[in-house]
């Protein structure tokens, strides 16, 4: 969305979850991120459910969707569709080394980002903090 925004194009984020980045953030963090993104002029649609891709003459013209604010399907007109289908932590090395990983993947860390090996830290998408 930011790359499209940087091209001076209207940009929307469609998120199926009730808030942004639910794997990485709690609800408060997701809502804070949404506010920051919306402050940039990017529109965020949480709870989004894509109903139909509208194509005319071989070109994408829009998407029919519902979201948390609009329970009835509506048309969001678009010129371009960019799909980002989530993340999966790359924790293979940690697994091979016997470092604890979470049930959904990712290196388990404490509040100081330490893994089960006190000499190894993890951060970013690979870190799993409960």
Image: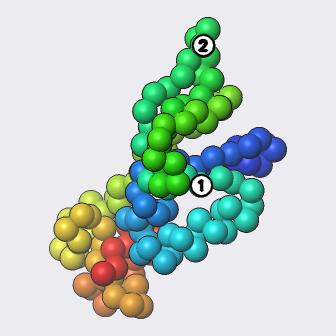
Residue 78 picture location, percent across and down: 65, 32
Residue 8 picture location, percent across and down: 81, 44
Horizontally, residue 117 falls left or right of residue 34, namely left
State the SS at label 1. Answer: strand
Q: Residue 44 shows which numbered tag? A: 1
Q: Residue at x 35, y 60 (%)?
A: 89
Q: Residue 56 shows which numbered tag? A: 2
- How many marks can you see? 2
Q: From where the camera sits, is residue 42 visible? A: yes
State the SS at label 2. Answer: strand
Whether tag 1 and tag 2 are in contact, CB under 8 A, the answer is no
Residue 41 picture location, percent across and down: 74, 56
Q: Residue at x 44, y 37 (%)?
A: 50
The quadrant the C terminus occupies is bottom left
Residue at the extreme front: 72
Q: Sequence-wise, which precedes: disc 1 or disc 2?
A: 1
Residue 11 picture location, percent across and down: 68, 45
Q: Residue at x 54, y 36 (%)?
A: 74
Q: Residue 130 shows which numbered tag? A: none
Residue 48 vs 130, above or below: the answer is above
């Amino acid at each position: 969305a930011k790359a499209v925004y940087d091209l001076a194009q209207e940009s929307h984020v469609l998120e199926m979850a009730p808030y942004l980045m639910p794997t990485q953030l709690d609800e408060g963090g997701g809502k804070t991120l949404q506010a920051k993104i919306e402050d940039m002029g990017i529109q965020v649609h949480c709870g989004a459910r894509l109903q139909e891709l509208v194509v005319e003459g071989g070109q994408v013209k829009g998407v029919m969707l519902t979201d948390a604010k609009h329970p009835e399907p509506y048309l969001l007109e678009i010129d371009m569709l960019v799909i980002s289908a989530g993340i999966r932590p790359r924790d293979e090395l940690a697994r091979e080394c016997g470092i604890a990983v979470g049930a959904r993947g990712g290196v388990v860390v404490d509040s100081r980002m330490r893994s089960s090996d006190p000499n190894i830290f993890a951060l970013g998408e690979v870190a799993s903090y409960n």
